[in-house]
Amino acid sequence: MGMPRKQISTVSMMSLRILMLFLGHVLCPHLYGQESPGSPIKFAGIWLTGKAVDSDSNFPIGKRYAAQFGNDDTTDLSKKLLGQVRFAAKAGGKRLVDRVAPDDFVPGAASGKALVMACALNYEHVESIQIGDVKKVLAEIGFDLVICDFSDRSVVVSLPGRVIRTDISKGPVSEAQKKQLLEHIYSNELIKHFLKLATSCGPELLGIKSAAVTKVTILEDAQKVFPPWLKSRAEEYYSNFAGSNFYEGAGLPLLPFSRGNEVVYCAMRENLTDASTLVEKSIKESGNDGVAFVLKKPEYDIELTIPGFLTATASNSPAGKVVQNCAYARITIKKGDMVIYSEKHDANVQNIIPQGSPNTTPWLAYLDATNKLFFEASKRISSQKNAQIKQMLTECAPSSLLKSKP
């Protein structure tokens, strides 16, 4: 089975559009909102998405490193990440990493300078597939580099990433092996991939319009294939999965999928001098316990429909058979009530199943095909001659126009 690509990308050279946006921020910041490229960004550490009560089941390993639990592992990893951010930063630089504020900086929402950055963990899981007498094991985590503007309680930047590590097992995959793979990712891989995102782009992202996965529809045939851990988090997972591929393939950053009360965004506001005022405001507006957070409404909505998966036998031999594992999706893009793109997409990967191997198709096989589907879809969309799609890319991902050229 082909190994999935690591979904961390580097934005290509700045286009004229980005340069103009950047100069516009410097010369006329009032035209582009309250934040200017010189506004410092407070670093808030590593957080888990979702509800706190689900942390044990969704992040059995990652919860050790999350800021909301405040243990030694958390402190060490967040400090190490911040240390690497500071090491990578350059005085006078134009990247996100160069904007991270000193430790003693405390933003305030009332001041209009209230940018807070965090590493938001979206999911972790381990899958395996048996090939003959060996098992291929894949450990994966998904995360976002998130920047919130607490002057209006909006998410202004969300750069998605995926980190993957594979291993081979001769026998059954033990819980200890799964734990070891995930711990390796957190301890050794997460920081460098987060830095790739933080060093790949600059404040031009704060001035562009936004797109987001706002609806994920999973049909019954697809749900039957999902592993248990995915069934309750399919919307968030597919949002990150699509986002990481769209960012890598087309330079298009997507805002995170949320139901409006993600703990990570609410917790990040505690870095503000006037955090209590924001909590009171949330309670008055929503009538709840103060955890509500208003996400920035995207100018472009991306809707995903996942109908199902298919495995087809391509050939048979005494040694085994060759199968095609296929994934399908419909991707719809809307600007307001207007549909500007709606197409079916599919992709397949070829696998060799030796004689004696199980005939059931594990999720890992379909994962490869889904990964390929979204990456190829991002390329196909970014190469569209449709004027409305071109406008979306110009407004949300100007660098994609350069990427799509030979």
Image: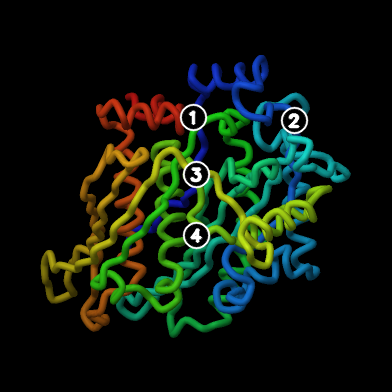
Displayed quadrant of residue 329: bottom left
Residue under the point 51% across and 57% down: 258
Label 1 vs label 3: CA separation?
27 Å
Question: Residue lying farthest top?
Answer: 27
Residue that mark 2 sits on: 90
Please name which of the two marks, 3 or 4, marks the residue nearer to the observer: 3
Residue 362, numbered circle: none
Would residue 334 appear left or right of 287 to someone viewing this image?
Answer: left
- Quadrant in the picture for the C terminus: top left
Q: Is residue 74 above or below residue 42?
A: below
Q: Which amino acid does label 4 sit on?
A: Ile
Percent coordinates x, y for residue 372 in the rendering = 32, 52
In 3D space, how far apart are the residues under numbered discs 3 and 2 (Cα atoms)?
Answer: 33 Å
Q: Which residue lies furthest to the right in this view?
A: 104
Residue 28 placed where, x, y %?
Answer: 65, 17
Q: Nearer the viewer, residue 389 or 145?
A: 389
Counting residues from the N terminus, which is met first, the one under dot 3 or under dot 2? 2
- From the image, tell me which residue sits under label 4: 164
Front of the two marks 3 and 2? 3
